Amino acid sequence: MTKELSVVGKRLPRPDAPAKATGGARYTVDIKLTGMLVGKVLRSPYPHANILKIDKSEAEKLPGVEAVITVEDVPKKRFNSYLSDLLVADATVKGDKQDEHVLSDKARYVGDAIAAVAAVNEEKAEDALKLIKVEYEELPAVFNPVEAMRPEAPKIHDFDEGNVIHKSYPLYQGDMEKGFQEADYVVEATFQTTKQKHCPMEPSACVASFDASGRVTIWSGCQMPHIGRRKIADIFDIPEGKIRWLTPPASGGFGSASSVRAEPICVALAQKSGKPVKLEYTREEEFVATISRQPVAQAGKIGVKKDGTITALQTKLILNGGAYFSHSRSSAMVSMNMFFALYRCPNIAAEADIVYTNSPVAGEMRGYGNPQAMFVLEQLVDMVAEKLRMDPVEFRLKNYKGVGEPSWMPTIPITSCALEECLELGAEKIGWKEKRARKKEGMVRRGVGVAINAHVSGAAPLLLEHSSVFIKLNEDGSANLVVGVGETGQGILGGLAQIAAEELGLRYEDIHVVAGDTDITMFDVGSHASRSAYVTGNAVLLAAREAKERLLKRAAKMLELSPDELDVRESQVYIKAAPKKGLSVAEIARDAIYNFRQDCLQISGTSSFEPKGSPPPFQAVFAEVEVDTETGEVRVLKIVIAHDIGRAINPATVEGQLEGGVMQGIGYTLIEDFIVDTGTGVTITDNFTTYKIPAALDAPEIEIILVEKPDPTGPFGAKSVGETAMISIAPAIANAIYDAVGVRITELPITPEKVLTALREKGK
Amino acid sequence: MTKELSVVGKRLPRPDAPAKATGGARYTVDIKLTGMLVGKVLRSPYPHANILKIDKSEAEKLPGVEAVITVEDVPKKRFNSYLSDLLVADATVKGDKQDEHVLSDKARYVGDAIAAVAAVNEEKAEDALKLIKVEYEELPAVFNPVEAMRPEAPKIHDFDEGNVIHKSYPLYQGDMEKGFQEADYVVEATFQTTKQKHCPMEPSACVASFDASGRVTIWSGCQMPHIGRRKIADIFDIPEGKIRWLTPPASGGFGSASSVRAEPICVALAQKSGKPVKLEYTREEEFVATISRQPVAQAGKIGVKKDGTITALQTKLILNGGAYFSHSRSSAMVSMNMFFALYRCPNIAAEADIVYTNSPVAGEMRGYGNPQAMFVLEQLVDMVAEKLRMDPVEFRLKNYKGVGEPSWMPTIPITSCALEECLELGAEKIGWKEKRARKKEGMVRRGVGVAINAHVSGAAPLLLEHSSVFIKLNEDGSANLVVGVGETGQGILGGLAQIAAEELGLRYEDIHVVAGDTDITMFDVGSHASRSAYVTGNAVLLAAREAKERLLKRAAKMLELSPDELDVRESQVYIKAAPKKGLSVAEIARDAIYNFRQDCLQISGTSSFEPKGSPPPFQAVFAEVEVDTETGEVRVLKIVIAHDIGRAINPATVEGQLEGGVMQGIGYTLIEDFIVDTGTGVTITDNFTTYKIPAALDAPEIEIILVEKPDPTGPFGAKSVGETAMISIAPAIANAIYDAVGVRITELPITPEKVLTALREKGK
């Protein structure tokens, strides 16, 4: 680590940037294949209904229509569209609830996919949809999870459990009774979070094409193409090797692309029609027919001694999973783990009820249960600190778990932690002490709040967690880095290129990344759980190391020296004892391939990397807000986000992730609200007119602090950043609002109405 | 070799067959990219002219036209479109004549590319061509190479040498004078071969697209994508790593796709317009603007003793290279080498004049100089055997060079040879003795003839010769074999899959081949010089061996045994001592990738293979013909072709190559004639109406004999087949005609007119 870095740590342009900035990037929707059909989906207008009969004969007769499919035409096997379902390590919960069909056997929410068509163009496909006659038998529907838990509630699935899939899914340690008895102060409260949508700019899209040998190629900007391949293999009973999954660039994933979305229906249409099919969701379909973050009703309780020691921590969740199970169990589990990951506490208990309702499906979204947990925990902590008359920053500094203590996975200790630095630097930048101390008066009042979090750098050992990488040297001295992750906008490919360049000793511009084609990339879990920089990054490091060894061996032969006497930097192999002498990598690479003395070979490297754990990145978020006490309106003036990155492979990319996360966090906190009409089951907020997300002009001043304390297990010390940025925005803002006006809002989004109501309640 | 083979040697379906048979295969012309333009080329109407001025302003103004280019817009650097030009090992002849521009600076033949356009559709592009005003200064033209050699001939290029590029390019050994003095009989004759066209079903086509970072992707069914990438790199001064060359399936190459064709102009148009461009040649352009086989005027002379010992062999070639140099030097060199490759002879001499004319360019075609050499040699041998009253088969058996003797590369001995078996089995099948002995009488007379050849299994050590291969195991137990050669119709991918399956112990259907994408495949010279089965095949063998070692290591761990105790066959790993016990490859592969005890990895293998030599396959061809003495018409009744394959990886594919070659040989012998009007320079035979090739109904009875005597250096003993099949068809037919009617035709094609004329001459 003492060697000076020449590529890692630099603010280098992302390889995907030029194409995206110039409009040259080609997304899934840009794919055109000869004879390609357009797919369309018929969706249920009822939130809950039996399907008595479907007559598709008229649709099939329409000229230009090549396939009309219903549940009768798709595999009988049930599945879970959540990809990581295949990765669960714990045998006792292996295979999350399998409750979906490619097309539904029953309408369970407004938007449930009932039938699909493939036709020569969009117009014909739309016409065909209108000709499908579905006879529904309407059933009573339920949208509220508490109501859905009642024995008399309409049963959405035929499972024994009724609508409650996981009653009291437990996580506990110590003695709760004793814990709360020992406490001098106990605080408890209940909270409600919302059904946030990922809102990538590109709605789900897929192209599927079978060849004459029965092999299928799928184009889709999936976050986890290798796992997607296996999912399709499982659903359609096609061996993995007969599926090729290609990932065109995706315009954002945020967890939405870690499930199969349009792919199963698209594959079924391609299979039925025997032709390539493109299935592109409309924005409205994207809203109703793909997953959202899980809305959670959550109670939290904390007990502390007078000296600030936490004696007990308890939480209970009711998670509205929507009509299908998706990621519900693992999100709840991670949420509970994260609730206990931050602070030392001997007595902990959590339980979660995961409930089916007749609403669009909830699943994975950036943060994966952690934003919900932190919205609860980080407000409870402030509430109890207030009782102790202790500064919230001090309280956190006293209680947080650091190096050597158990991480979010209690069996695996924390390997690095810069939370103290994050809290101290962040407090300094926001002007914590002065601003907390200032008087809160006038119509418009300002306040500051803090919230922290720890997250993951991959899912080990909870889920399967490994990556393999291939690298080869071209004759011009550049290298092609072949990785199984795709670019979903997070900037991973540039980061991996920087790791490869640094380790192999090449210039950054000499690394060409080839990504996300399952036929040619070695296995990689993909991009989820903030894992790629850490896990794939480590695999890149090892493959580059092998290629470097071979490069130096070749150079040593050419220079008649031993490889030990050489090193490589900025695409130059140099003699350590005489650093100005040596050969360029291009000379060596060209000699390896274009050597005319019968001494040729291809320099390459391969690797597999599987981590034992997942070093948590820590983070402190400070928010300054302005609250209008007459209108209830909250303006976020400034966010300071101090992040324990271990090593910023590319500080600009890390900052980009954090900035984006701040905005997504602000949307979650103040604006975004997914509304299902509880009369009709119709999603009212199914486009950007009704479902607002923050835009550039809504951005506050954002100050980012990257604290670099290299993690011993990370590539060049790196830990993750992807999910963290939005996790603690909501509690930081809620705590700042409390600081400003003394009201605590426990229900998202924090609208002016809720603030005004709280102010009025307080005023009474 | 004693182990029983389970995949190699089987008649298995080719992986490319289903798509091609069902119309599902997607060729370069099927590629559709967003915003893609259509390219068109303006070609010279004059065989020889200076270009005084080009006014492209009107064309540029036409709406929908995005680029108009001339020699002014393309790189100044001259190049040779012949790809193997980059592979020449001999430093003294390195870099064959560099005499081409992307667009010409002068018109040197009718069809020379003068300008090109890219427009939104074909109509606009055609319109634009008409608006380009070219001011030509016509120059005297020369079409006959003998005339072109005269000092006063119009000079086609500005080089010092005039039109004769290689005066007396020499190859000699021993003492010619002494050799002919020692001979009891000397025979000499002159021969003329033709400008045969490759005639793949798909004319040259290319798509080129630059991305915003300046990286270009090229789609073209090139035989040698890695070398094509370097050629484009050299021409356009783009580093190789910034070029991705993808090879959609090509509908036949036969050597036409071992040069760049439409690619340089297409790349130039894409570069100029900044948009993707598709450039597809018409059949007429394919005829005039891509290479053909070299027409050769060749004298041959042989001296023998009464006992049949050859004392001297001499030949002189005048090779009509056409307007640009292309492959002329190396074709002439191989032709001369092959002239001396077959028979023991202490005194040999050859020289070649390679001449520019104002005709379409000649270059590589299947056989690469060998068909021309054999047309001469194998008739001379029959002529001299007749003088000796020796059976032509006996003469050949007495004189051919076998194992341990010098091969076509005198420094490298022959490692295996089954020519004796080929001659004996072939003679038996055609009924040689009886048919030679029968009386030749009546209007329609039958005769039999024989001719032999030896060829190459790769170009080592003449040209750079190596291949690298990557293989990875999927979780279903199948393997992806990633190779740098493309499928140009020869069936190579199936053969390589068989080699991989056999060595790795998988079933054939469990090998998925990914081919011909320079971004992901390791370096491979490509498919030329009959090299892929031998060279890439050996690389596949080594990569599969490495993957197998890793597979058995993993299996051994699972079974708690040593890898030595295990082997794998038909996708089952078995315990040698108890062959019914073990694990399926799928179980092992799935455990490697989906192991939940933190013991995962990706099983893979890589290899580089570079041969020291190129084991020649030998071949004997027997032809039976019927000659109508009144019309001169020749009917080929039967061809028996006995081929020394070493090991037939897939006998069906080998037979397919041989059958196709027989037909191409029959076309060469009897029908195909490329005619350039010596007044105007216009190619008269520029489509399939005027240039006839044999069709299925023209096929004689073809009997194929595969002699399998494994070569010690080949993959499972394999040598090559690709080029050989057409090499000796013409001399075998010519010898059979002589047997039937006693006239010897030395000029191709052997038309009824020539036969009749010869019969009349003989009758005088």
Image (spheres, coloured by chain):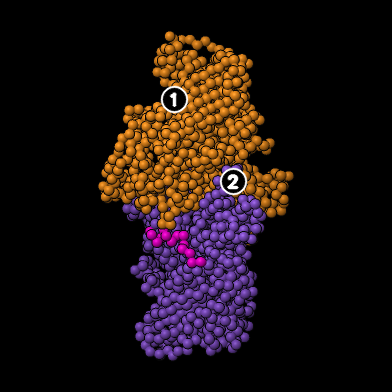
Chain colours: A purple, B orange
The answer to whether B332 appears left or right of B109 in the picture is right
Q: Which residue is mark 2?
A: A600
**Above-or-below relation of A288 to A477:** below
Q: Quadrant of residue A625?
A: bottom left
Q: Residue at x 44, y 83 (%)?
A: A737
Residue A19 inside the magenta-drawn segment: yes
Under tag 1, what secondary structure?
Answer: helix
The numbered dot on residue B698 is 1
**Above-or-below relation of A250 to B762:** below
The answer to whether B500 appears left or right of B282 in the picture is right
Q: Nearer the viewer, residue B73 or A86?
A: B73
Q: Chain of mark 2?
A: A
Distance from the alpha carbon under mark 2 to that under mark 1: 46 Å
Residues behind callouts 2 and 1 on a single chain: no
Pinpoint residue B759: horizontal percent, then vertical percent: 43, 13
Three-letter amino acid code at the position of disc 1 = Asp
Q: Is residue A707 visible?
A: yes
> Dot 1, how many residues are within 10 Å of its Cα: few (below 14), some (14-19), or many (20+)?
few
Three-letter amino acid code at the position of disc 2 = Cys
Specify start and end residues of the magenta stretch as a single range: A10-23
Residue B540 inside the magenta-drawn segment: no
